[in-house]
Amino acid sequence: MNKTFCFIILSSLCCITAFAVDLTRATIVWQTKDAPLVGQMAQLLADDIQRVSGIRPALEQTPDLEPSTLRVKNSRENIVFLSTVKHTSIHKELRGTWERFVIDSHGNNIYITGSDPRGLAYGGLHVSEAVALVFLS
């Protein structure tokens, strides 16, 4: 059952952006050096996608991989990159804040960045909620 999930996300600039990413073909990537909660959120997101679609996305833990590197390489498609701002060079505006997240996309990739592990968890749960809402509609 191949489904392309469409997410409507309200960005921090209060404009609505819509994009579609096939999460069943995605690889969920997080860094080894990040907090344990980041890996747990990757597992949870993969579980939720599997519950909805019947297909579990791949999971990949990497030692050092920056979202900017993923954007430049563009060698892989459909990546969901999870990271806290402490371990990435994007969304520096989140530094020093608590429990905030930003979800953005570039091509077929989704980047979920949290100001701290709990902020990242909120971002991951937001995407899981969007997956469930698309399935129910």
Image: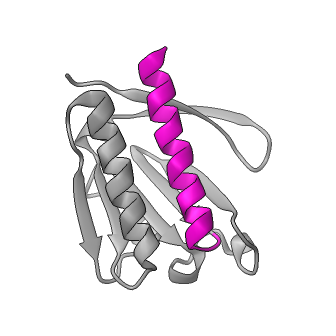
The residue closer to the viewer here, 107 or 81, is 81
Q: Which residues are magenta?
A: 115-137
What's the residue at 36%, 59% (across, down)? 42
Q: Position of residue 25 (x, y in %)?
A: 23, 41
Query: In the rendered view, would you say 32 is above or below 93?
Result: below
Indicate the quadrant where residue 85 lies. bottom right
Q: Position of residue 18 (x, y in %)?
A: 57, 31
Q: Position of residue 133 (x, y in %)?
A: 51, 25
Q: Residue furthest top?
A: 137
What's the residue at 28%, 76% (across, down)? 62
What's the residue at 68%, 75% (across, down)? 92
Indicate the quadrant where residue 90 lies. bottom right
Task: Indicate the colouring scheme.
Answer: one colour
Q: Is residue 134 magenta?
A: yes
Total marks in image:
0
Q: Is residue 5 magenta?
A: no
What's the residue at 48%, 50% (across, down)? 106
